[in-house]
Image (cartoon, rainbow, N blue to C red):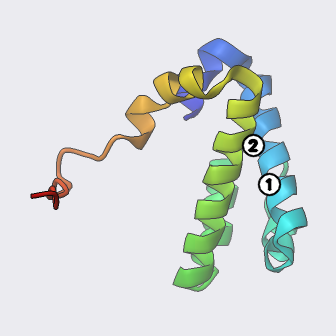
């Protein structure tokens, strides 16, 4: 997401969105407050990863989902849903190794 957004928002803009996302996650989900306190407010993904690996699998997954959805929502409020979807299309697309979902309609 950093590579997709930096040309549009700049490095400081992406870092600000990340910091705001972390802050909102901790404010809206008190159980994440400890994780928020452990992660620096800069865009240091190594620090985030080191904190996540210390969590249980369920907590790490929950934090990751909340952080990504919060980041996406903030970006959508700033630049709109259409541009957000276009900029992050490559980030959200499943990898080529993923099994394609099967259509269930008759």
The residue indicated by pointer 2 is: 18
Q: Residue furthest top?
A: 7
* In the displayed structure image, the side of residue 3 where residue 41 appears, left or right: right
Q: Tell me where residue 54 appears, x and y as whole percent.
A: 63, 80
* In the displayed structure image, the side of residue 98 where residue 5 appears, left or right: right
Of residues 53 and 14, which is closer to you in this image?
14
* In the displayed structure image, the side of residue 19 where residue 6 appears, left or right: left
Q: Quadrant of the N terminus?
A: top right
Q: Tell me where residue 77 appears, x and y as whole percent.
A: 75, 31
Q: Residue furthest bottom?
A: 56
Residue lying at 61% horizontally and 72% vertically, measured from the top left = 62
Q: How far apart are the alpha carbons under marks 2 and 1?
A: 6 Å
Residue lying at 77% horizontally and 37% vertically, measured from the top left = 17
Do tag 2 and tag 1 residues touch (Cβ < 8 Å)?
yes
Q: Tell me where residue 59 appears, x and y as whole percent.
A: 62, 80
Q: Tell me where residue 20 appears, x and y as whole percent.
A: 84, 45
Q: Quadrant of the C terminus?
A: bottom left
Residue 12, by quadrant, is: top right
Element carrying mark 2: helix
Element carrying mark 1: helix
The residue indicated by pointer 1 is: 22
* In the displayed structure image, the side of residue 72 where residue 17 appears, left or right: right
Count the labels in the image: 2
| Dot 1 alpha-carbon crowd within 10 angstroms: few under 14, some 14 to 19, many 20 or more | many
Q: Residue furthest left?
A: 106
| Dot 2 alpha-carbon crowd within 10 angstroms: few under 14, some 14 to 19, many 20 or more | many
Residue 61, by quadrant, is: bottom right
Position of 38 relative to 99 (above/below): below
Of residues 52 and 96, which is closer to you in this image?
96
């Amino acid at each position: 997401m950093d590579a997709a957004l930096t040309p549009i928002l700049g490095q400081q803009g992406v870092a600000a969105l990340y910091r705001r996302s972390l802050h909102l996650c901790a404010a809206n989900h008190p159980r994440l407050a400890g994780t928020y306190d452990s992660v620096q407010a800069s865009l240091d993904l190594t620090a985030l990863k080191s904190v996540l690996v210390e969590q249980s699998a369920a907590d790490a997954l929950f934090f990751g989902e909340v952080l990504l959805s919060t980041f996406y929502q903030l970006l959508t409020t700033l630049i709109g849903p259409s541009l957000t979807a276009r900029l992050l299309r490559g980030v959200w697309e499943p990898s080529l190794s993923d099994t394609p979902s099967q259509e269930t309609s008759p």
